[in-house]
Image (cartoon, rainbow, N blue to C red):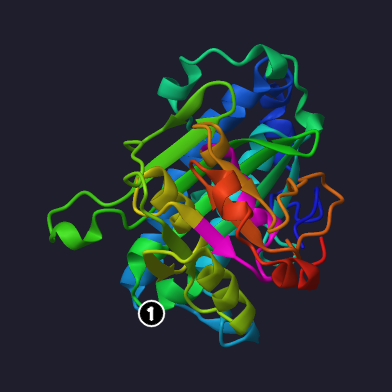
């Protein structure tokens, strides 16, 4: 697991060549610079993801089974994100999904840019004096890997979540194949970002019409328990798609009113960035009991009590989760 600096995906010379960056990154407003850098890093990651697909060789390996895959894109993107952020912010804790060997990273995977538009925003007062070492970054290099291998490209996202004092406070969600069905000349990809106290950007916020109950849930990890929980809500419609990032986007763009996953399986790197983006526009994401998630560097990675998220009317959906379901999901 790429926990703290166990990855060290960079040559030793980086410490000398980029020593000036260490001084700069310890200054105030480190959060906004980390978000701005994460934005650029996510856009490079999207290019890597598309290039792997275009190469025709996805380099697929099974981790724990046919529904738990890793591709060359997962590996290259995680190296790119973690190495780029660690070079510029050497004191942050980075936790990535993929368990990768310790090795040097080629220069072509590094991203040095940042979003100047994000830097125009004033850092919220409560985060203005954060230090690098106070931040934990959760990275899912390819959320929706199975869908990626099956060509369901609109399900795929790249997630970079930023946590402080155990709370998700900022997130970047990149959709590398956004707009891919618009034709050969379409511009692919978009990046959504959010910070608590500022808001979320890169999309048009919409809500499901009043009185409509549309559930988005897992496509490939369903179970009787998941289906029983959904049935108890009596939804008008159920959408089954891949990727936690994709499901949160459905909530904030008015395609679904609740994300329900009454099962273990989701991990902290799946929920940190989406939670921050959702919370920044007034939504709510918790476990199935309504308990908030914690994102400390030493917390267990599994969200063992499932996921429940809404843009609005959280209490309505929470109240309809059966006690029988709650009793089987232990936080």
The answer, for residue 321, to whether it is visible in the render is yes
Outermost residue on the bottom side: it is: 66
* Residue drawn at the location 46% of the way across and 68% of the way down: 242
The answer to whether any part of residue 51 appears in the image is no
User: Quarter-wise, where is residue 19 in the image?
Assistant: top right
Q: Is residue 270 magenta?
A: yes
- Residue for point 49% across, 67% down: 217
The magenta stretch is 259-277
Residue 52 pos. (x, y %): 40, 68
Q: Residues within 10 Å of mark 1 (few under 14, many from 20)?
A: few
For the point 55% across and 79% down, the residue is: 222
Residue 171: horizontal and vertical position, in percent?
A: 56, 39
Reading the image, the residue beneath label 1 is: 150
In which quadrant will I find the N terminus? bottom right
Relative placement, left or right, of 281 versus 300 is left
Q: Which picture quadrant has residue 66?
A: bottom right
Quadrant in which the C terminus appears: bottom right
Going by the image, does 307 lie left or right of 38? right
Residue 38 in the image: state x and y as whole percent. 54, 38
């Amino acid at each position: 697991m790429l926990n703290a600096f166990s990855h060290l995906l960079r040559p030793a010379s980086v410490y000398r060549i980029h020593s000036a960056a260490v001084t700069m990154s310890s200054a105030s407003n480190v959060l906004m610079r980390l978000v701005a850098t994460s934005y650029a890093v996510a856009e490079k990651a999207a290019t890597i993801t598309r290039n792997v697909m275009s190469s025709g060789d996805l380099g697929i390996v099974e981790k724990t089974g046919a529904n738990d895959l890793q591709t060359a894109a997962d590996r290259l993107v995680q190296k790119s994100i973690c190495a780029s952020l660690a070079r510029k912010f050497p004191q942050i804790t980075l936790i990535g999904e993929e368990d990768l060997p310790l090795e040097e990273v080629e220069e072509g995977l590094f991203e040095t840019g940042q979003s100047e538009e994000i830097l125009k925003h004033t850092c919220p007062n409560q985060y203005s004096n954060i230090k690098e070492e106070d931040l934990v970054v959760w990275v899912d290099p390819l959320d929706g890997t199975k869908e990626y291998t099956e060509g369901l490209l609109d399900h795929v996202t790249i997630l970079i979540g930023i946590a402080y004092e155990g709370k998700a406070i900022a997130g970047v969600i990149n959709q590398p194949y956004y707009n891919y069905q618009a034709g050969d000349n379409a511009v692919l990809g978009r990046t959504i970002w959010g910070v608590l106290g500022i808001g979320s950007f890169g999309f048009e916020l919409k809500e499901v019409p009043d009185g409509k109950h549309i559930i988005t849930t897992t496509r490939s990890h369903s179970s009787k328990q998941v289906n029983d929980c959904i049935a108890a809500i009596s939804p008008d419609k159920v959408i089954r798609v891949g990727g936690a990032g994709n499901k949160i986007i459905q909530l904030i763009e008015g395609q679904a009113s609740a994300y329900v996953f009454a099962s273990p399986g989701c991990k902290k790197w799946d929920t940190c960035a989406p939670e921050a983006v959702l919370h920044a526009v007034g939504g709510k994401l918790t476990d199935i009991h309504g308990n908030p998630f914690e994102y400390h560097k030493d917390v267990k990675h599994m969200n063992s009590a499932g996921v429940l998220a809404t843009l609005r009317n959280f209490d309505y959906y929470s109240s309809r989760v059966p006690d029988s379901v709650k009793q089987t999901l232990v936080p």
